[in-house]
Image: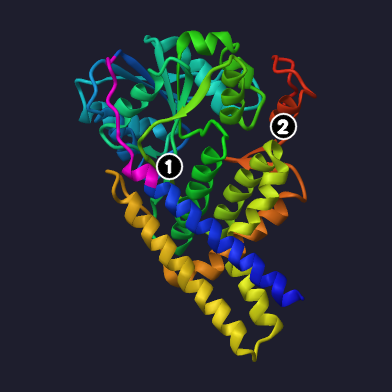
Amino acid sequence: MISTILLVLVAVGLAQALAGLNLLRRFAAAPRPAPTTRPPVSILKPLHGAEPWLDWALSTMAGQDYPGFQIVCGVAAADDAAISAVRTVQARYPDRDITLVICADQHGSNAKVSNLINMFPSARHDIIVISDSDVHAATDWLDRVVAALQAPDVGMVTTLYSGLATVSGLVARLGAMQICHAFLPGAAMARALGRQDGLGATMALRRDTLERVGGLQRMANTLADDAMLGILVRQLGLRVALAHTLPAVGVPENTLRALWKHELRWARTVRSIAPAAHAASALQYPLVPALIALLTAPMSQWGWLVFLGTWLARAEIARRTDTLIGGFPTLAAVQSVRLWPVRDLMSVAVIAVSFTGRDVDWRGKALRADPVVADIISGKRGTGPETPSSAV
């Protein structure tokens, strides 16, 4: 009986991985429309600290093949180490409109949103693109984002993204594998099932849309600000569209402890939004039930066949996913076959531990992943500025 259940779980996990691969294959093969017009754009880049390859990430913004855009970078302190990267990119691209805002004003518990609120007065254009500091984008990223935003029923545009190890070592590769081979196919499947989640790597909308939802202040006390913004836009009767581009986000962790804390923050944030779906996401890691099957019958030939077969299948699906990611002009993570059992075990452990509490660490600041967004979806809580703080 137990062996049958374990085999079913393995089959479900592999089937989900194959479905995600197929969706990514369709995404990679789909046409990449150009915008009908190319209006000026303000790109907001909230920064904090000297992340690995930060100047390169900012350079991919400055190097966009798009006319008439500005980049607004923001930090909360005059001694923030990210300033050096901004100065480097300003010198590298002297003809680009790159502004640095230094302001320590706090507008809520979410430091990123506070930073954005301080930066917003410097944004001059009607189209606002909020992009995380570690995003590495192709030169046509802005074209694809603007093209998606020009559909008449679209209120916000977001993007899928892959993972890019920005430091050497196995830990960063483990983190990039999680993004490329769990988050990415999972997010593609969620879109196919009708979800329109806002994904924080890229969020683009018109200024008047942002004003209609109450401005950035509406997210000032919400940890899941990207999900919150997407929900507020959909409440206007507008869609959250997916741009046909695939930027990469950096994975800078070089210790397991740092990677664990980062992934636990992600997991508890997702759990606060959709707890049932988050729990079900453990099914996408088939090596865990395969390993349990092996441990329950260590001398059994079928246990070894199931475990090794699942391991090889997981690695082959990941290899094909990397090939698809490599079809976009950005860097893909190089997956390691030998790391898959560790990666799947760690992923399931993170999911399990995410249900034991709500406290998270965001760059040294203690926050709590309260179910604000889930309550708004269910109608238990309003969306006004009275939303309580998530600071611990």
Magenta residues span 26-38
Local packing at callout 1 (Cα closer than 10 Å; few below 14, some 14-19, many 20+) is: many
Residue 119 vs residue 233: left or right? left
Circle nearer the N terminus (2, 1): 1
Q: Residue furthest right?
A: 380
Residues marked 2 and 1 touching at CB (< 8 Å): no
Figure quadrant of the N terminus: bottom right
Q: Position of residue 289 (x, y in %)?
A: 65, 70
Question: Which mark, residue 161?
Answer: 1
Image location (x, y in percent) of residue 184: 48, 47
Q: Residue at x 43, y 61 (%)?
A: 318
Is residue 283 placed above or below 298 in the rendered structure?
A: above
Image quarter hosting the C terminus: top right
Relative height, residue 116 to residue 323 (above, below): above
Tell me the amino acid under the disc marked 2: Ala
Q: Which residue matches tag 2?
A: 374
Q: What residue appears at the point 49 percent right and 8 percent down from the top-left corner?
A: 208
